[in-house]
Amino acid sequence: MSSRTDSDRPSAEARPRIRVLHLDHTDATGGAEFALLRMLQADPGWAPYLLLARTERTGFGVYDALPARVPRRRSGVRQPAGVSAGGAVMAVSSGLRVIAQAVATRCSRVFRSADIVDANSARAAAYGAVAARCSRKPFVVHVRDLVDIESLGRAGHALMTRVVLPRADGIIANSRATLESARAYVRPDALIEAIPSASGLRPGAATVPPPDPSAPVRTVGMLARIDPWKGQHVLLEAFARVYRGTDVRLQFAGDAPFGHEQHLDDLRRRVRELGVADQVDFLGHVDDIDGLLARWDVAVHASTRAEPLGQNVLQYLAAGRATVAADEGGPGEWVTNGVNGLLVPPRDVHALAMALRRLDADAALRARLAAAASVTPGLLDDAAVTRAHEKFYETVLRSASRSTP
């Protein structure tokens, strides 16, 4: 009788890799898109393929940064933004586009060859669920928004709760809050797990110099796409109350995708009305996040509805910045008030202004919060997030294999 040694066993590289078809409805600079981009850049242990809906642009937008080893293509029809805020006509048009995209996805060669179909966004989940229906393809959904009408809109909520989640074999939520909001609509045999999004973190790395406890506040910042619910207007009002007429600067880093250019114009107008035009910078999209955060003394999250995760909060903490966050949704899972940041009631300009004043007056507090932020338990770099996804995909595939007659 012969026995196998470790050298006889097939290596991880020799084993066939799981073929994962990643679906996304957009290539805009959104949080979901950056999360998938970072994960696919982190040398995943599966064989990824990215299938995008068509757009009017050439190239692949944010996904142009993917390495050449990740194949990608477009199919189907455009999936315009603004559906959740649209009326009945927009909802009907969106439904027809979802059906058309589902047909294009189901008919694609990459769908037929995939081991797992993975939807990266809520819209992709809608047409992915329709495409995967009556197929034996395990279907995994990334739930990146709270499953409620405020976050998804009525049509989106109905699609998510009646079509998407009941079909899903696996649910990856970006926080415990997001997972709990979805749990009531998930099949009893579906696999569910909370895995934070890949956010470009480098916990413990000395990428951002620690703050000088003797230095005054010079710059307050927010890293988030320009969107009414991200709360730039809340921070702007609070900043003006505390710092108008001083040499302290406020910086907003982020594009205005998904049709929110008008909101950016509104913010610029409000800056002038508040008399802080010479203190506020709208930086647009910033690639060098480490360099950006190194210039900020205080980093703020001020979303006006419950944030499912708050990638910016994770980025602030990992960079060791004095962090202020709205106490609602996912950020409260990471920030402990007075320990590694300050939590304030959401949508409360006065409370946010008071937190800014407190940090401005107490340099020792800023330094203590910043030091604790950088060692917040559970912060994962992109490679660790990617490994967690690989393990989840393997578990879903094994479970699907056992249930297939």
Image (spheres, helix red, strand yellow):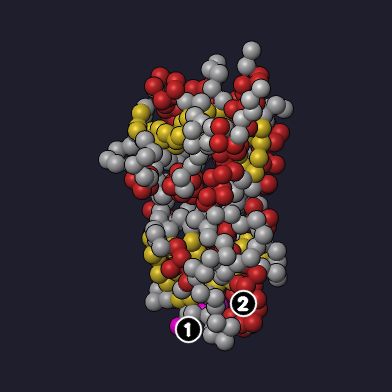
Q: Nearer the viewer, residue 91 or 218?
A: 218
Q: Which residues are magenta?
A: 242-247
Location of mark 2 (residue): 366
Which of pointers 1 and 2 indicates the residue nearer the eye? 2
**Residue depicted at x 43% and y 68%:** 291
Question: Can residue 251 be seen in the rendering of this structure?
Answer: yes
**Residue depicted at x 34% and y 33%:** 73
| Callout 2 amino acid | Arg
Per the model, the C-alpha gap separating discs 1 and 2 is 19 Å
Asked if residue 353 is among those painted magenta in the image, a careful observer would answer: no
- Residue found at the far bottom of this picture: 214
Quarter of the image for residue 393 reads top right
| Callout 1 amino acid | Thr
Q: Nearer the viewer, residue 159 or 318?
A: 318
Quarter of the image for residue 280 reads bottom left
| Image: 324 above or below 122 | below
